[in-house]
Amino acid sequence: MTFSYKKLMILVDDAGKAFPSINHSPWFGVTLADFVMPFFLFIVGVSASLVFKRVSSKPQATKKVLLRTVKLFILGVFLQGGYFHGRGNLSYGVDIAKIRWMGVLQRISIGYLFSSILEIWFTNDYPVDSSKAFVRRYYFQAMAGIFIGLSYLILLYGLYVPDWFFEISSLNMESSVSGYGLRTQTVNCGVRGSLEPPCNVVGLIDRLLLGEKHLYQRPVYRRTKECSVNSPDYGPLPSNAPGWCLAPFDPEGILSSLMAAITCLVGLHFGHILVHVKDHMQRVIFWSIFSVFLTLAGYVLELAGVPLSKPLYTLSYMFVTAGVSGLLLVVLYYIVDVKCFQKAMILFQWMGMNALILYALAACDLFSGALQGFYWYSPENNLVDITERFIQAAFNSKKWGTLVFVMLEILFWGLVAGFLHAKKVYIKL
């Protein structure tokens, strides 16, 4: 299942600039891109249930989990902490005083730690021979998920968010809009329970614990109507842009990552069905029922006033994305394992076998960034940009040319993964 998520991540990251509608939602709502992170977290939970279904030594297993969590977190800081400046920027390096501590791999490491520890230590040794026995065996895990969810809601709606101020980063000094002449901006809050960009508890906790300078400096709400004339894409600030438009906010912050870990727990229980239910169609039925229930519960919560928001990882967002993750698992399982259409998916299976290295090279632009370092007279005359411009010209469309370029990129990385598989090279932590 990881292979499909890898493909989807490359698609939304690289084609999102041409098709803002599939890029991350500016704040409320969900788009295709907003499902990628929950998909990864979900499959981490499924994997944990398979890896730790039999544990000979709990302390030894815990030691391995802690070590892998630390390595994954450090790798995330290295890749997304600001050291690499991305495609189109040939410089590198980061001021330690401004390094970004949280990110995609860091969130995955937290979810992995959460689901693995629960599977190792909080599973009762009851034989599963009925639905009641299934519940008794994994009761503590469900209670842990409920506890984290309730804690999140209490903090989100109960903590008071005072007025705060921030220093405008040089990364954001791209506009001379009225009101942004000062380097320091004040954000007026003084509220409880706000889910809007400037005054939510998720941002408050990150500013208190991580520090404003260590947060993501170009958050998605820069693409809202209040902050971009090109909304839902990035663009210049409107003349009446509010003061918080240039404020930092981390989409993979501390509180939202704890909520995201519940998605791993949902995947954990889907994995339990895989372990204990042996019939293919029974697995499909159980997964489908659970997935539909989660999805409907999420939309009911939205109707009740809990908006869908990836940056906040709201309860409704968690339910909907976890439910859709389950439905995707059902579809892929039915195609690959029930109907045995495995050859058609072989390219993506290869990508799943080396997902980590492909994430670093492709999604984090390490390969394209390195390739752009070789250019002809001018930095924009490099193999990557020349190829993309050529395809755009061939299709007489920047949007559709970019999409074709991204599809070719996915094919390229699929073949690279196939080569690594043929050589039996698998890079893991």
Image (cartoon, grey):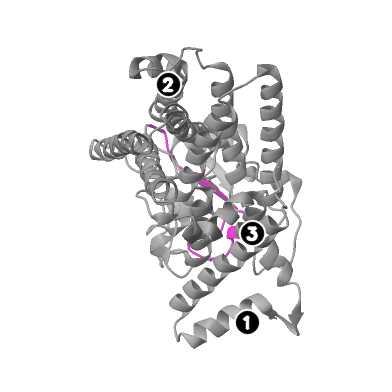
Write the residue at 43% across / 45% down: 310
Q: Nearest the camera: 398 or 324?
A: 324
User: Residue 169: percent from the left, percent from the top?
Assistant: 62, 54
Prevailing secondary structure class for the magenta stretch in the rendered image: loop
Region in magenta? 169-192
Q: Nearer the viewer, mark 3 or mark 2?
A: 3
Specify which label sits upstream in the sequence, 1 or 2. Answer: 2
Residue 320, located in which quarter of the rendered image?
Answer: top left
Disc 1/disc 2 C-alpha distance (Å) = 52 Å
Residue on which the image places disc 1: 386
At label 3, which amino acid type do we have? Ala
Q: Nearest the camera: 351 or 385?
A: 351
Disc 3/disc 1 C-alpha distance (Å) = 24 Å
Residue 170, located in which quarter of the rendered image?
Answer: bottom right
Q: From what the image shows, is residue 86 above or below residue 158?
A: below
SS class of the residue under badge 3? helix
Specify which label sits upstream in the sequence, 3 or 1. Answer: 1
Q: Nearest the camera: 408 or 111?
A: 408
Write the residue at 68% across / 78% down: 383
At label 1, which amino acid type do we have? Ile
Q: Nearer the viewer, mark 3 or mark 1?
A: 3
At label 2, which amino acid type do we have? Ala
User: Residue 71: percent from the left, percent from the top?
Assistant: 72, 38
